[in-house]
Every structure is written in C-alpha cells, then in structure tokens.
Image: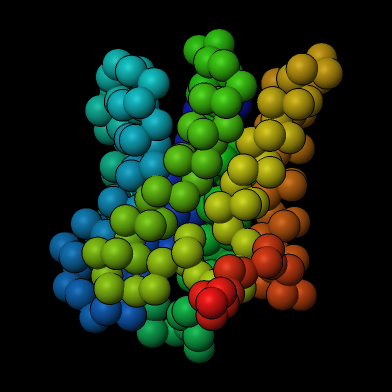
Amino acid sequence: MTFLALLDYASVLVFALTGALVASRAQLDIVGFAFVACLTALGGGTMRDLLLDRNPVFWIGNPSYILLAALAAIAVFFTAHLLESRLRWVVWLDSFALAVAVPAGTGAALALDSPPVITVLMGMATGTMGGLMRDVVCNEVPLVLKQGELYITCAMAGAITAVAAIWLGIELQFALLACAGVCWVLRAGSLLFGWHLPVYKSRPPRS
C-alpha cells in the first residue's frame, strides 16, 4: 500500500465516523447512517478526482473504501449511545479527518504534477467538501463556515506548507506529514484557544 493510499483510507475512516455521529444526532436509521457516512467519507475525494480528471474515481477503482465507510457507520449505529457528548466527538474527529484528508488531496495533485495553485485548491477541496455535504444534508451548522473558528484556513495553510516543502526539496512523505501537522495544530488551536481570523462587521453608510 502506498503512502497516498494509506492517507485516503485514514481519511475515509475518520470522516465516516464523523458522518455516522452526525446521523445519530439526526436520529436516522441504519441505512441513513451508511449514506451519510459514505457521503462524508467519499465526497471530498470524489470532487478532487473529478476535477483532476483521475479515472476511475478512487472509490470506484477500489470499492473497499465504500465498505470501510459502511462498516464504520454500522459500528457507530450500535455504539453512539455510549458517548456522553457526540457533538464534541464530531468536532475533534473532524479535526483529525481534516488533517489527513488535506495531505491526501494535496498528494494526489502533486502526483499529477499539478500547478501549485491547483494543488492547494485540491487539498482544500478534499479536506472540506465531505464535511460540508454532511452538515448540509443533516441540517447542521456547517463546521466549515462556523463563525469564529479556523477551518478552511487550516486546510489552505496545510496545503501551502506541503507545496512549499516540495519546492524546498523535501521528500513527498515528509512534506505531507508537515501539511497534516499544520492543519491539525491550527484547527486544534482554534477549538482550544479561540484562534480566528478577523470577522467582517457591517458599518453604517457614510452620508
């Protein structure tokens, strides 16, 4: 198994767990759990592969990704009631998923020799779109757009870190590990310490 494939598997697993936990908050049936888990786990990678024209899309070429997401959903269906705060678990698992999915998307774009801007955008899309689809479908406030928290910024910073590391001659594996570290540290800092970017505030029009 290649390092990029390992990142994809890890991303699918952790994002599937978050999707299933959100499904539990929405009190869906077991099929609904599997649907939301698969949507969350595969959504970002699917968009990445379609935009990069990778054929076949990663989970079509290897259906074990779907099986992994479905098994994660079934496991959560029978164990979610044991968790004291499912929202807290969603938020923190999502932070780990972001830190795995962004380097997975960035690495996929780098493997195709994509330009730096496209590489960064693919890393961001892979890390954020699955969670956005999950929250919209389950009528939750999207974590991606939650005011006062860093999320998309973390994905962008991580992807830029990987691109910069490759430009400096660092090996791909270590560049992607640096990407993951930057993503998670920024996201965790936002959750723990309230790190955030300035928020737009409307002002009265000038006379």
The residue depicted at 33 percent of the width and 80 percent of the height is: 25
**As rendered, which of 181 and 85 lies closer to the eye?**
181
Q: Is residue 71 visible?
A: no
Check the image and report above or below for 203 versus 43: below
The residue depicted at 28 percent of the width and 51 percent of the height is: 39
Single out the residue that lies furthest toward the top: 113
Check the image and report above or below for 80 versus 67: below
Q: Position of residue 101 (x, y in %)?
A: 53, 42
Q: Is residue 194 visible?
A: yes
**As rendered, which of 62 and 152 lies closer to the eye?**
152
Q: Position of residue 159 (x, y in %)?
A: 64, 36
Using the rendered view, name the quadrant where residue 72 is placed.
bottom left
The residue depicted at 52 percent of the width and 25 percent of the height is: 118
Single out the residue that lies furthest toward the bottom: 84
Single out the residue that lies furthest toward the front: 207
Q: Position of residue 186 (x, y in %)?
A: 72, 57
Q: Position of residue 178 (x, y in %)?
A: 76, 37
Check the image and report above or below for 159 versus 108: below
- Give the colour scheme shown: rainbow
Is 75 placed left or right of 188 in the picture? Answer: left
The residue depicted at 27 percent of the width and 70 percent of the height is: 138
Give the tally of numbered discs. 0
Is 67 placed left or right of 5 in the picture? Answer: left
Q: Quadrant of the C terminus?
A: bottom right
Is 142 placed left or right of 36 in the picture? Answer: right
Using the rendered view, name the quadrant where residue 171 is placed.
top right
